[in-house]
Amino acid sequence: MNFAKMYLLGALVAVPAMMHAQEHLKSLDVKSIDNNTPASKDFYMHVNKGWMDANPLTPEHARYGKFNILSDSSDNRVRRIVMNLSKTNPQKGTNAYKIASLYEAAMDSVRRNKLGAEPIKADLAKIENARPEEMEDLFIWMHKNYGSPLMGAGPMEDLANSQVYAMYVSGGGLTLGDRDYYLLNDKRNKEVRDAYEKLIEKQMVNAGYSKKDAKRIVKNVMKIETLLADSTWTREESRNIPAMYNPRSIAQLKEMYPAFPWDRFFIETMGIETPDQVIVTNINTIKQGNDLYNSLTDREKKDLYLWEYVSGAAPYLSDDFSDASFEFNKVMSGVQEQRPRWKRALGTTEGFLGEAIGELYVEQYFPQSSKDYMVNLVENLRNALGKHIIHLPWMSDDTKVQALKKLNAITVKIGYPDNWKDYSELTIDPSLSYWENVHNASMWAVNETLKKWGKPVDRTEWGMTPQTINAYYNPINNEIVFPAGILQAPFYDPEASDAENYGGIGVVIGHELTHGFDDQGCQFDAVGNMVNWWTPEDAQAFSTLTQGLVNQFSEVEVLPGLNANGQYTLGENIADQGGLRIARTAFLDSQKQKGVDVTSPTAKIDGFDPMQVFYMNFANLWGQNIRDEEIRSLTTGDVHSLGNNRVNVSLKNIEPFFEAFGIKEGDTMFRPASERVIIW
């Protein structure tokens, strides 16, 4: 379990110094506007339909939008970097050598197909041949090397004292991710379960098991994972961060869950002395794991371990394994064609050596001018949010003081880390199989996390690589982070107007800033500690407002019979709306400082008023085509609303948007003042 990223909030989903001419992406393209769909009827389609018609889904994609365009651009850049490294014959042991070697191993399908399941046979035999008296040893071995069956643990910043690490203990994960896939009996969830069972059977046959044995493994895995799902929180419950913070002494932990060999677990899997205290997250799920550890037969445990091992290794074995995984993915997302092998190979290489690649990426594609622009933009947005907080009618003066204190303390990271990750102890050996190299890299990553235990928290660390097309807010560090990758059009373009840039990256900055004050971020103070700094009256007022936003999104039918989940997506919806309002204020302030009258006819951009362009580029960010299967999957498992709802539902609360486009009562995009929700 990746405890280090448990509480990263707000992930969304620059003109380079040496950019190829064809790669210069543009912000808003007025040719994409569909005048047959009035802005007053469906603003999302008004802005994006032209682009959507011109960019139909290809078999490779379950959805395709502006993020995908940026991702493709980033992938092509990274591919050139990696391919060029291979041509330089890098010295063994260097980062360049490791990057080139891992990528080449990932691309060598001939070798992988020749090996088949051979790289995993010895480990599968170890699991199969374990004697009854060796089952505890097997449990420890699995946790040390290959997974977290029935429970997991690891160090992460202490939510109550973000300067130090705490040891967190959590329940075992569900392969399908969400409990509903196991527990609900509607058509869609049955379809997913059937596909999952076929996946398990096929992969175990690929691993060398008979169909009879594979079917037994399917039965036992489904039994165990369904029981774990029954004790797992719902999506809505999983947003309750304080409920995940349950300090217990080691004596209490052993009393609560006596089946697990706790001392051996900490000493042998982590290489540390048993801690005096741990933080228990989902109490009931760990109890279910404890009870299963006591009650399952050795055969059932082995089958669970076999599947956890094979499912983790499958992407790095022969095409038989990846083809089976793709067949399952077709059911989950509706995608019709696998991503090209080179994209999958890049994904693995970046997954383990992302910052080493990122260091090369920013040298070529991220000029200082982009960083300077962002620094100024962030401060403009910070000042704008401060103005909004001061004038909030629902927040008391005492809480405003604390809110401003937190706002002013937010750390901003732009482009790339100040200190690059050290990969000197990571070994990539071309003589080993792809799976062996991936496993060794995984063990290195785990050990890097375990090294943090007992040391001060490193607040310079990044949770994303520089080339990532995304951004995030981390409440434990009280920081917002904008990798170089997202600082391109349509988010940011130095050749675009301020209206486009504020409607793009400006809204993103505002989005991330307000994550510090959404329904989860507001539970952390200026230094990142989980502290309640709200008066009871303010907390109630905030809850009332946010419930209105929950209702607005939950009433949207995304597919026949399927509504959006406004509670699960609440944090992102708060941030979207807050980002829009704050970015508008910052944009108007910036134009005033420049002496620009945005209402003047001379300020028009391609015939549009600047405020129209501001809102149009915001809508432009989220334009995408998407398959129904992916809509269902995202509605089940994604904390973000679908793109069209991020635009239309959010904008229906914003009076200046109505003014910009002459939207009036009776129009589809209009919402009466009494029904609008204004939080920030």
Image: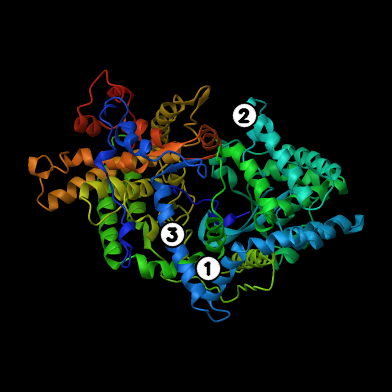
Query: SS class of the residue under badge 1?
Result: loop
Rounded to the nearest angstrom, the CA distance separating label 3 from label 2 is: 36 Å
Say which residue appears at 71% left-offset and 46% top-offset: 286
Query: First in sequence: mark 3 or mark 2?
Result: 3
Nearer to me, 132 or 424: 424
Q: Secondary structure at mark 2?
A: helix
Quadrant of the image containing the N terminus: bottom right
Q: Position of residue 88 (x, y in %)?
A: 49, 78
Return the x and y of residue 528 as percentages of the image width and height. Answer: 45, 55
Q: Mark 2: give few (<14), some (14-19) or many (20+) Cα within 10 Å.
A: some
Q: Say whether residue 434 is left or right of residue 476.
A: right
Residue type at mark 2 is Arg
Residue sitting at x 57%, y 77%: 424
Q: Quadrant of residue 229?
A: top right
Secondary element under disc 3, as helix, strand or loop, is helix
What amino acid is at disc 1? Pro
**Mark sitting on residue 188:** 2
User: Of 532 and 351, which appears nearest the observer?
Assistant: 351
In the figure, is residue 553 to the left or right of 632? left
Crowding around mark 3 (Cα neighbors within 10 Å: few <14, some 14 to 19, many 20+) is some
Residue designated by label 1: 456
Residue under circle 3? 76
Q: Which mark is residue 265?
A: none
Q: Residue 663, position in %: x, y?
A: 23, 26
Indicate whether 265 appears above or below 531.
below
Q: Is residue 128 above or below residue 96?
A: above
